Image: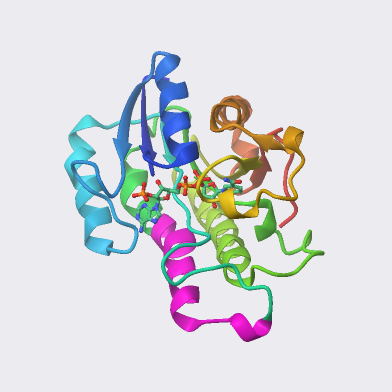
Amino acid sequence: MTKAIVIGAGGGIGSALAAAIEARGTEVLRLSRHSDPPLDLEDDASIEAAAAAVADRAPFDLILIATGLLHGAGVSPEKSVSQINGAAFDRLFRVNATGPALVMRHFLPLLARDRRGVIAALSARVGSIGDNRLGGWVGYRSAKAALNQIVRTLAIELARTHPHTILVGLHPGTVDTGLSAPFQRNVAPDKLFSPQLAATRLLNVIDELVSADSGGCFDFAGERIAP
Ligand SMILES: NC(=O)c1ccc[n+]([C@@H]2O[C@H](COP(=O)([O-])OP(=O)(O)OC[C@H]3O[C@@H](n4cnc5c(N)ncnc54)[C@H](OP(=O)(O)O)[C@@H]3O)[C@@H](O)[C@H]2O)c1
């Protein structure tokens, strides 16, 4: 692997992934809302423009979408149906599903086509419909389920058009970042990963992916997550 792109490279897991990839001797292009060019998932034109701005550095072997939203201005995970809020839902879907779909659209042409190329989006186990026993967090959960369906759907098309391309969702585990910070109280210490450990595990999973895995969602141990 010679060249990678990390989108969301300023985030807890994204920055650890970028550092871990670089430590393997792979060149990393870091993109975020604060990079040059900037990439904002809530702005279609910035996604397209960022892809165009880095196209002369293609082909890339790995594109990681390490962005995501769980809480923030006007957004907090719902505990009950009465907390469902349209604007918050829209943002959760925009950042966790629509934005990554647009990234796939505009960045896929930058991936190597004549050899193995991987594009992976950080998803979450809570996006699994089959695994959902707890309820709650309906907006985030549904947006990650949508992301997993986007991955599955595009992978079917890519298997025909880009047979060497592997498109997957990845669950990093519960990782000590700003995203999980308000929800760590009930997490056992050995179940809360450092971003560095999560990055190492995720890269190990990516190393082992084969074409038949495309369209799936995998956890940090390489286990397939139920759709
Ligand atoms: N941490 C966990 O326990 C955990 C568990 C399961 C899944 N995940 C998933 O892992 C991924 C990374 O999460 P994290 O823990 O590293 O969270 P984080 O530290 O909050 O990072 C999230 C990243 O998303 C970026 N982002 C948010 N909105 C954006 C937008 N509109 N345009 C561009 N970038 C945007 C942020 O960019 P800025 O730097 O510009 O703010 C930040 O880099 C997410 O998809 C999350 O759902 C995390």
Q: Report whether residue 180 is seen.
A: no
Q: Position of residue 11 (x, y in %)?
A: 42, 42
| Quarter of image, res 183 | bottom right
* Residue 1: quarter of image: top left
Residues rendered magenta in the picture: 81-101
The answer to which of 102 and 195 lies nearer the viewer is 195
Residue 81 visible here? yes
* As drawn, 197 above or below 182: above
| Image coordinates for residue 37, horizontal then vertical, percent | 19, 44
**Magenta segment main secondary structure:** helix
Q: Which of 201 and 48 is in front in this view?
A: 201
Residue visible at 58% across and 81% down?
84
Residue displayed at 68% across by 52% down: 125
The foreground one among 189 and 105 is: 189
In the rendered image, residue 114, in percent from the top left (x then y), is placed at 40, 29
Q: Look at the image and tell me in which quarter the C terminus lies.
A: bottom right
Residue 85: give x, y in percent of width and height: 52, 82
Residue 132 is one of the magenta-drawn residues? no
Residue that extends furthest to the front in the rendered view of this protein: 185
Q: Is residue 77 left or right of residue 111?
A: right
Q: In this view, does 158 lie to the left or right of 217?
A: left
Q: Residue furthest right?
A: 133
